[in-house]
Amino acid sequence: MDGLKLATPTTTGLEAKGAPQTTLEQETNQRVEEILPTEGNKTPSHTNNVRNEPREQNGVKHEGNNIKQEVKREDSDEELRKYNRKIPQERSAVKKDEIDAHYDKLPWVFGALGRVFNLGISYGPQFAPIRIPLRRRKQTFAVLFWMSTFLFMGTGSLFFLLYLFFYTQYWWVSLCYLTWFIGDRSVCNRGGRRIEWLRRWPLWKHYRDFFPVHLIKTAELDPSKNYIMGYHPHGILSAGAFCHFATEGTNFSKTYPGFTPHLLTLEGHFLLPFYREFFMASGAVSATRESMDYLLGSEATGRALCLVVGGAKESLDCHPGTVCLHLKKRKGFCKMALRHGTSLVPMFSFGENEIYDQVANPEGSLIRRVQNTLQNIIGLAPCVFIGRGVFQYSLGIVPFRKPIYTVVGSAIDVPLVKNPTKEQIVGLHEKYVKAVVDLYNKYKHKYSEFPEAEIKIV
């Protein structure tokens, strides 16, 4: 939580300006000792294994003192997560101390209103402290900008052009843009129109640090080849895929030199005025057969196409603590890989499902039937998601600060088959699904907040 520091025996990494009360610190320390094992209870073999294991982030291995600091920080984060889950709810006196400490950080008016309306830490709006480091303000602004472009830029521009055309003397502006759009509408299927300057905005570094987002490289890729890189899971908005492939927030070009990344997405995104230009400038293109044929069919090499294989339908099953991948019926990308001899690279993004909550929508429920109907009509999945706000942490469109670890697996070599048979397509698909499941099982205990969650393929 922004600006809130919880006193524990170890450093949690959460920053705060004010010091907690002494009684609260003693109570908290006592609870942590009761709930969590101490460092002395850990076996020496477990400690040595963790310290000796090289950690790779953004394509760089951390050795020596750096790995010890990283392990200590991970242990602290893990302890904090366990503490937050297992805090005794019956300890009402302790909870009241936490609420009082929270309100003491707020201006008098907000604190008084919070107490009057019983807006506690666990059962009501949680206001953000006034004094928060500027860097965290920049991070929140960067993510709010990203969300605003997705939700409001396209529809807002459409209504603005309609208003100009019907109600003002500047109708010719709308007519000029319509003329431009008619001649330019298919460029999203012909490689797009990327602008490196926009991809390298400093804003995207703040976007990366908000969660933060990490790119984990596990194997080398040959820049003399092209790759279709499958991104799993979809999440609500594929925040990690956007950061890696539509920006240089995680330094993709340095981690994988010689590659030109492209984010493949629904063609409907490129029908919205002005938003389509902004999105294409990031290197995004349409996820259609025509678009992939254009990028993979030319003689150019070093193209990394990020395809969110589960599609919009998978986003409806993206709930925190669950892993449900829509893969059984998704075989078109395998056929495309065989037709062009393009290698497949599985990726799994741990934490993608945790940055938003989503209203429960089990199969067969009324809300799910409505969502499926709208998804079939408009192509986009109308997820009812819940995030946080800018000045409070309970409700809004801003995602929660949850780390995202995108692990890039080894490439699956694919032979060139101009007219692949059904058996070849199914065989490659089974091999790819196995690689995704193995990648998840191999790294879930290291990067997942819910390692006990079983992966489900539907």
Image: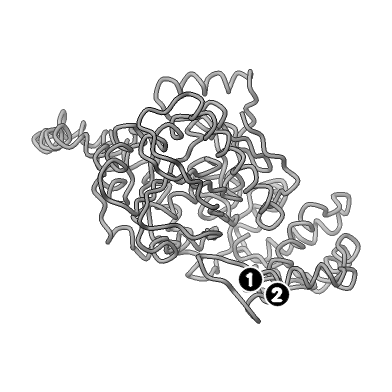
Measuring 60% from the left and 33% from the top, which residue is drawn there? 317
In which quadrant is the C terminus drawn?
Answer: top right
Residue at x-position 72% and y-position 46% = 123
Q: Amino acid at mark 2?
A: Ala
> Looking at the rendering, which quadrant does residue 64 occupy?
bottom right
Whether pointer 2 and pointer 1 mark residues with C-beta atoms closer than 8 Å, the reply is yes
Which residue position is annotated with label 1? 16
Residue 203 relative to residue 234: left or right: left
Q: Which residue occupies the foreground of this view, 354 or 2?
A: 354
Residue 237: x %, y % from top left: 48, 42
Amino acid found under the numbered disc labelled 1? Ala
Q: x%, y% of residue 162? A: 21, 31
In space, the residues marked 2 and 1 are separated at their CA atoms by: 8 Å
Looking at the image, residue 397 sits to the left or right of residue 46; the answer is left
Q: Is residue 434 left or right of residue 377?
A: right
Q: Position of residue 109 (x, y in %)?
A: 60, 59
Identify the residue at horizontal 55%, vertical 39% (top origin). 432
- SS at circle 2: loop
Outermost residue toward the bottom? Answer: 65
Asked whether 352 or 90 is in front, the reply is 352
| Image quadrant in which you'd find residue 152 | top left
Residue 8 drawn above or below residue 442? below
Whole-percent x, y for residue 298 in the image = 25, 44
Q: Is 328 placed above or below 386 here?
A: above
Q: Nearer the viewer, residue 316 or 244?
A: 244
Task: Report the disc number at residue 19.
Answer: 2
In the picture, residue 9 is in which quadrant? bottom right
Position of residue 380 relative to residue 25, above or below, is: above
